[in-house]
Image: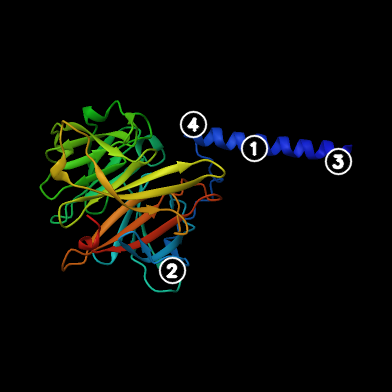
């Protein structure tokens, strides 16, 4: 009898624990690991992960790494840029950036990363939630998009905030939903997407998409459009391909049976942007097991230099949930002319 009561209590405690976790995550309050002591070591470690698949739709899977560091400001990466052919630049949701060398090979790599705050307000998440990065490849100028205060900042070449603006078109965006995706197109226009779902249709979910005719920080007014994504998938980053099209990274959060994430890579054409219809794309690949998966939120594209081929780098946001999530780096290669039409 006593044993039965003990088992009943254990079941109740387990059920209560599951309910608490689900409610906490569903409300947007992430279950975080205890804050570590403030280690400021610049060392990061990139450990190769085994791959069970070498193709992903039209993409070749060239590598996956788990990234770790004892640095207090490490983690939470939601944006990614390729600064050159050897260097990646990641933006975190606590307002810090990390510059590090692209990994390669089958052995773990320990290297010296460059950690840097974007603003002086990195202790206040509302003023430092860096979610997107884009860059002018000609001048090297970088822009960052921030959630909570819904701002766009122009950064200097070291990644520090030089000037910021809160566009009127973004001021009423819900907390923790934008600007998740931002890309500067080759013609000088900027696309900025919100993660929030504005409405649902039989074809998928609609999200607000702003098209700025130039640098948003200059004060130009955007045109408000919508973009369509597969149901449940939110746009979290985008980057332009050499042929002018835009690759969009999407993510879906699943809470049961345990917290996990799946993603999509889709291609959109800026030539089809219209006020009369949602901007629609085509899904090329699904980011899900057996591929190493987590909360992929950052996407960088590096052209091969000759021909249409590109390398895609993806980074995941561990939400500071060190027990449940990881910071992953994924490398894909794509020859666009090999994709199905």
Question: Residue beneath label 3, please?
Answer: 3
Q: CA distance from mark 2 to mark 1?
A: 37 Å
**Tag count:** 4
Q: Position of residue 171 (x, y in %)?
A: 27, 27
Residue at horizontal 55%, vertical 36%? 22
CB within 8 Å, label 1 to label 3: no
Left or right? Give the position of 75 relative to 20: left
CB within 8 Å, label 4 to label 2: no
Question: Residue beneath label 4, please?
Answer: 27
Q: CA distance from mark 4 to mark 2?
A: 37 Å
- Graded by Cα atoms within 10 Å as few (under 14), some (14 to 19) or many (20 or more), the crowding at tag 2 reads some
Label 3, secondary structure: give it. Answer: helix
Q: Which mark is residue 141?
A: none
- Quarter that holds the N terminus: top right
Q: Is residue 279 above or below residue 185?
A: above
Question: Residue beneath label 1, please?
Answer: 17
Residue at horizontal 22%, vertical 35%? 278
**In which quarter of the view is residue 151 placed?**
top left
Of circles 4 and 3, the one toward us is 3
Q: Position of residue 92 (x, y in %)?
A: 37, 48
Residue at horizontal 28%, vertical 38%? 228
Marked residue nearer the N-terminal end (1 or 3):
3
Q: CA distance from mark 3 to mark 2?
A: 51 Å
Q: Nearer the viewer, residue 303 or 93?
A: 303
Of circles 3 and 2, the one toward us is 3
- Graded by Cα atoms within 10 Å as few (under 14), some (14 to 19) or many (20 or more), the crowding at tag 3 reads few
Q: CA distance from mark 1 to mark 3?
A: 21 Å
Marked residue nearer the N-terminal end (1 or 4):
1
Question: Residue beneath label 2, please?
Answer: 110
Marked residue nearer the N-terminal end (2 or 1):
1
């Amino acid at each position: 009898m006593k044993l039965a009561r003990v088992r009943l209590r254990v079941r109740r405690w387990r059920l209560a624990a599951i309910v608490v976790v689900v409610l906490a995550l569903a409300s947007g309050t992430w279950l975080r690991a205890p804050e570590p002591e403030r280690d400021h070591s610049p060392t990061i470690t990139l450990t190769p992960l085994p791959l069970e698949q070498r193709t992903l739709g039209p993409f070749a899977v060239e590598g996956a790494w788990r990234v770790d560091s004892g640095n207090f400001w490490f983690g939470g990466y939601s944006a990614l840029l390729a600064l050159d052919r050897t260097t990646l630049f990641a933006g975190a949701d606590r307002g810090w950036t990390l510059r590090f060398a692209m990994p390669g090979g089958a052995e773990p790599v320990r290297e010296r990363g460059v950690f840097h705050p974007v603003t002086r307000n990195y202790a206040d998440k509302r003023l430092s939630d860096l979610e997107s990065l884009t860059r002018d490849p000609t001048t090297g100028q970088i822009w960052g998009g921030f959630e909570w205060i819904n701002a766009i900042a122009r950064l200097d070449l070291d990644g520090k905030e030089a000037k910021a603006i809160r566009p009127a078109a973004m001021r009423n965006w819900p907390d923790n939903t934008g600007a998740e995706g931002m890309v500067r197109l080759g013609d000088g226009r900027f696309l900025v997407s919100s993660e929030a779902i504005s409405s649902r249709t039989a074809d998928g979910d609609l999200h607000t998409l702003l098209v700025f005719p130039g640098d948003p920080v200059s004060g130009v007014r955007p045109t408000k459009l919508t973009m369509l994504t597969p149901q449940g998938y939110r746009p979290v980053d985008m980057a332009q391909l050499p042929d002018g099209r835009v690759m969009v990274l999407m993510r879906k959060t699943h809470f049961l049976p345990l917290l996990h994430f799946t993603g999509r890579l889709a291609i959109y054409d800026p030539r089809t942007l219209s006020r009369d219809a949602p901007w629609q794309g085509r899904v090329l690949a699904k980011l899900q097991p057996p591929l190493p998966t987590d909360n992929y939120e950052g996407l960088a594209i590096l052209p091969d230099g000759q021909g249409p081929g590109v390398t895609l780098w993806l980074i995941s946001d561990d939400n500071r949930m060190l027990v449940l999530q990881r910071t992953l780096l994924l490398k894909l290669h794509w020859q666009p002319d090999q994709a199905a039409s």
